[in-house]
Amino acid sequence: MELHSETTGDTLTITASGNRIDAAGAIDFKDKMRNLTEFAPEKIALNLASVDFIDSSGLGAVVASMKQLPPGKTLILEDLTPTVAKVFRLTRMDSVFEIRTSGVTNEDTRANAS
């Protein structure tokens, strides 16, 4: 899974370009998130528009990414697909994370990754 980042004002937006966050890529995902967020501004938005599947290891990697942030920094999840949103809802992680829509569609994200 590739992660692409862009800073605008006080927000670092990280866009996941792969379609899965699962056991096979969870450690790599956490490492990449740690590297990208080490010197990030106050707000970090993780755009998951292209992620169609997340398992418990992937969910754990997202939670670990939030927990490894320095004090005062916030991880916001953006553009969850219905399947991924359901996992966050069923595990009640939707009450832990701020989840929002950025207006970027799944198709836009995949087109930009090409």
Image (spheres, rainbow, N blue to C red):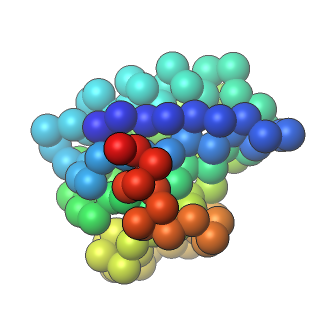
Residue at 42% across, 26% down: 32
Instruction: State how many labels appear.
Output: 0
Q: Residue 40 vs residue 79: left or right?
A: right
What is the quadrant of residue 12 in the picture?
Answer: top right
Left or right: 18, with 46 as reference point:
left
Quarter of the C terminus within the rendering: top left
Please provide percent x and percent y for residue 85. Answer: 40, 74
Q: Is residue 113 shown left or right of residue 25?
A: right
Residue at the (50%, 35%) spot, across then down: 4
Q: Is residue 31 left or right of residue 103?
A: left
Q: Is residue 90 above or below residue 31?
A: below
Q: Is residue 52 above or below residue 57?
A: below
Direction left: furthest residue? 24
Quadrant that contains the N terminus: top left
Q: Is residue 65 visible?
A: yes
Q: Nearer the viewer, residue 50 or 33?
A: 50
Between 62 and 80, the one nearer to me in the picture? 80
Q: Position of residue 48 (x, y in %)?
A: 44, 57
Which residue is rendered at x = 63% and y = 70% of the image?
Answer: 103
User: Which residue is at the far right?
Assistant: 9
Query: Which of 3/73 is in front?
Result: 3
Question: Residue 38 at what x, y percent from top left?
Answer: 62, 21
In the displayed structure, 52 sits above or below 75; it is below
Q: Is residue 93 visible?
A: no
Q: Position of residue 97 (x, y in %)?
A: 57, 62
